[in-house]
Image: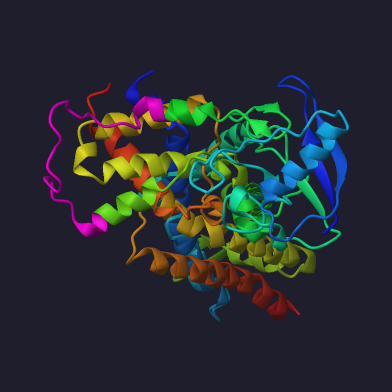
Amino acid sequence: MSWVTKTLNSTLGKKLLMALTGLFLILFLVVHLAGNLQLLLPDEGESFNIYAQTMANNPIIRVVSIGNFAFILIHVIWSILLTRANKKARPVNYAVSKAGTNSTWASRNMGILGTVILLFLIIHLRGFWYEFKFGEIPTAVYDGVTYKNVFLIIAEAYSNIAYVAVYVVAMAFLAFHLSHGFASAFQTLGLNHVKYSPLIQKVGIGFAIIVPALFALIPIVMYIQSL
Amino acid sequence: MNLTLKIWRQKNKSDKGGFKDYKVSDVSKDMSFLEMLDVLNEQLSEKGEDPVHFDHDCREGICGMCSLYINGKPHGPLQTTTCQLHMRSFNDGETITIEPWRATAFPVMKDLVVDRSSFDRIMQAGGYVSVNTGGVPDANEIPIPKRIADEAFDAATCIGCGACVAACKNASAMLFTSAKISQLALLPQGQVERKERAERMIAQMDAEGFGACTNTGACSIECPKGISLTNIARMNREYFSAVVSSENV
């Protein structure tokens, strides 16, 4: 084994991959949210449709999006590797455990939270990304240019209360995942400092509340608009 | 005080083991937890039964030999060692569950005794400094800022009891290993083996079968010496900078 594979196979190397991919996905959430908030503009989806198509045609964004899928896969696969090793490290569990007195629930259940988020991602990608790429989509014409009217697909989906509920609940899981994951990634990278760590903790909690809340707001508002 | 004790009994390493209930009466609130177990063991010896085996040595909270997972927490309800835990922390009539540390790297030898020699092997892998023989060096010959000396000392207060491993949901030894790496990495005397130390101690930690860190912080909360999580961040920095810059291909 070379020093690179040896390092990436160590527990710290595996955690490094989790932290780096996690931080990239956090960055992705910000970009994704900024784009999605255009769904709430009162223009029948014009700015969103133009934005979606421009993003899809941009070669840089396409490379980043392949990277994004790769990072999601790495984040998932390495979490499974780590979880398996961690379970092996304690084959016999305690009969009585008061873990709630020394750590947060989210920090102890990142795997469960992540699994629910992954299930949501599959539903989410099937519903919108797959439809946008391969589905039959109505078109809209703005300034003489034809665009895929993906806004219509989204608006239709969000007129279904069950679909909206799935999104809102999934965002609650994402919030808990981020409430631990954000600051934890910095700690894993060794970025712990008496000046900055308290700030990172606060920003992490703020991020975990605001970003999923705004994501959840979109289907809620669009459902109300559909009534 | 009268108490019911639910204690893990296991004949040897290969035995499956299980819980057994015991009653102890007339326990004084001023007894330490280990003295209470001594009382139980006297009763068992008088009856000709095998006493409950548990680790202990100094009974002053400094040797790191005592362990026990008491009522769901390592070293019991207080942030101290089991030998410094007193029966006033419990209520009359209470049922107390006593388990051994649970980790693949800490196999149960008998009852509540676990083998913590995996910690020794991590230390042997790199937890030392090169010191020349010869005359006694002058005091304060090497200037070390007070703040650095204090930080190194804080890390060095780790007594290696293993409560961090016991508390961690992954049975990870990161807090222990990071404290031992930190106490030497911070000081001038520790610079000679600095990179080699980080690489070798972490490789040994992995080889022993300890889990990874999820940064839950449980280890630090339960540590009787209050070893801080900043040590784990420092260990990560030490390790990552060692692997990219050392000549160990």
Q: Name the residue located 69 percent from the left edge and 60 percent from the top edge.
A: B30
Main SS, magenta residues: loop
Magenta-colored span: B123-148
- The answer to whether residue B191 is left or right of residue B74 is left
Q: Quadrant of the C terminus of chain B?
A: top left
Q: Is any part of residue B202 visible from this angle?
A: yes
Q: Name the residue located 63 percent from the left edge and 69 percent from the top edge.
A: A216
Return the x and y of residue A226 as percentages of the image width and height: 72, 77
Q: Foreground: A4 or A28? A: A4
- Total marks in image: 0
Return the x and y of residue B47 as percentages of the image width and height: 88, 32
Q: Quadrant of residue A215?
A: bottom right
Q: Foreground: B79 or A19? A: B79
Q: Quadrant of residue B15?
A: top right
Return the x and y of residue B140 as percentages of the image width and height: 14, 49
Does the segment drawn in magenta span residue B110? no
Q: Is any part of residue A131 visible from this angle?
A: no
Q: Foreground: A71 or B235? A: B235
